[in-house]
Image (cartoon, rainbow, N blue to C red):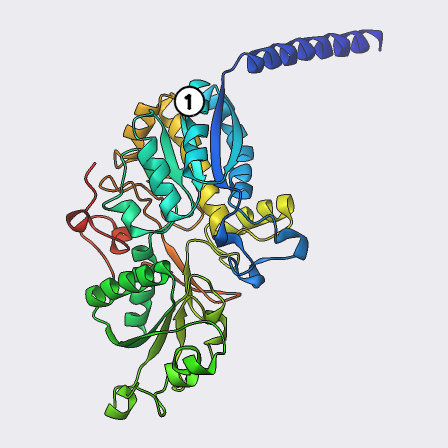
Amino acid sequence: MRGTCKAALQAFAVAALLGSGLASADDELPTLTIGYLDLIDDIRYDEWGIHPVDIRSATAIADRRAYSGAALGLEELKSLKRITKTHFAMERVSGTGSADLIAAVERMVESGSRYFLIDAPDDVVAEVAAGTRDHGIALFNTTATGDALRSELCQPHLFHTAASRTMLSDALSQYLVARKWHEILVLQGPLPQDKETVAAFERSSVLFGLEIIDIRDFVLGNDPRARELNDLDFLTGGLGSNYDFLSSGDDYDVVFVADADGEFALGVPYATQEPAPVVGASGLVPRIWHWSYMRHGAPQVHGRFERKFGRRMGESDWGAWVAMKTIGNAIARTKSTDVAAIVETLRGGTFKVDGSKGPGMSFRPWNNQLRQPILLTRENWTVARAPLEGFKTRTNKLDSLGVAARGSLCNF
């Protein structure tokens, strides 16, 4: 018995020494701090910035920014510590505009940071990217969908985990073609983003053989003087109004709503003059992520996020989460934190990251856009995942969503 106790004590002492050595080795590992940039006031996150069904509790409404997804990604990077020989940390900087965020990048670069996530509208992302082009960093756009960021405003160090408006429109158009819904009535909101969304959908319609019957502008409110612009009977019918296409027999199969604000779109389903499905900003909505997707490991991601933050994981969260995962996996693959090596790896064509949506996802070398499936969703269900069967390209099937290399205006 005495010998057994002595052996146990010796084994415990050896384990303690080994543990101490491991802790000491961990303490000596370098720390890579990833910057997280967002705005103090971002209109996209106002009360209409996210559908109420995506929120599990009222207390979570104020905490639905992409930062939560980045925090989950940072926690998961800890598992790569032994491979990367690196500790990962994150510093969040919230500013009032692009000047604040550029200054934050410059300050953090002096401290050794080289990787940054940004959650901001299109114009701010464009200005920050242009202002940091020569700073030796990699910048990941997690939420901005503007096509210009991937074309004439592209930057060699700016990567996009958020899908472009064109990708979202292409996914929706594929579904309409598959359902043989070819004739579309478009309702367009007053915001610049609404016009850009319609422009993307017009491009997709030409590409996939859809016909836009008419584009009609709407406004918010109940002003009787603007009845033809705020009343769905007029917008989707033509009774007694200047809209007379229905009388010519050109009925529509679908109503597409472009409404970045989101308020008007909520009232369109089941309120159109013709019995027709609604798509776009309400009804069937294209998204990069939705809590109802239940394949390819998505339920496990949903579960981890909801346990940690008490709400459902949204699109902005996913964009930040997969950006963090991209950084960690690229460092693990290259065995280096050198930003030039990482950028070369991401644009090399062979690097892939698992976003729990099916196929491995890679970045398009001509515009740094992450190839990815798009989920076509209702409020509480995922109806389909694009690309749909039958829509292919010569190289990567995911390139049937978005601008191909030969059509890109991006020139690094």
Q: Residue furthest left?
A: 406
Q: Tell me what residue is drawn at x 24 percent, y 39 percent.
A: 365
Q: Residues within 10 Å of mark 1 (few under 14, many from 20)?
A: some
329 to the left or right of 215: right
Q: Amino acid at mark 1?
A: Val
Residue placed most toward the observer, 145 or 31 = 145
Residue 169 lies, in percent from the top left, at: 32, 61
Tell me the residue at 48%/49% (across/down).
316
Please state if 400 lies on the left or on the right of 353 as rendered: left
- Front residue of 247 and 333: 247
Quick one: 15 or 212, which is closer to the camera? 212
**Quadrant where the N terminus is found in the figure:** top right
Give percent across and percent down for residue 172. Answer: 34, 65
Residue 181 seen: no
| As drawn, 50 above or below 369 | below
Q: Quarter-wise, where is residue 329 in the image?
A: top left
Q: Residue at x 37, y 34 (%)?
A: 139
Residue ranking furthest to the front:
225
Residue 386: percent from left, percent from top: 34, 59
Place of residue 291 in the rendered image (x, y in percent of width and height, measured from the top left): 53, 56
Towards the viewer: 184 or 357: 184
Residue at 38% from the left image edge and 86% from the top image edge: 274
Q: Along the horizontal axis of the image, is 120 left or right of 4?
A: left
Q: Quadrant of the C terminus?
A: top left
| Residue at the disc numbered 1 | 109
Asked which secondary structure carries label 1, the reply is helix
Q: Is residue 29 above or below residue 221?
A: above
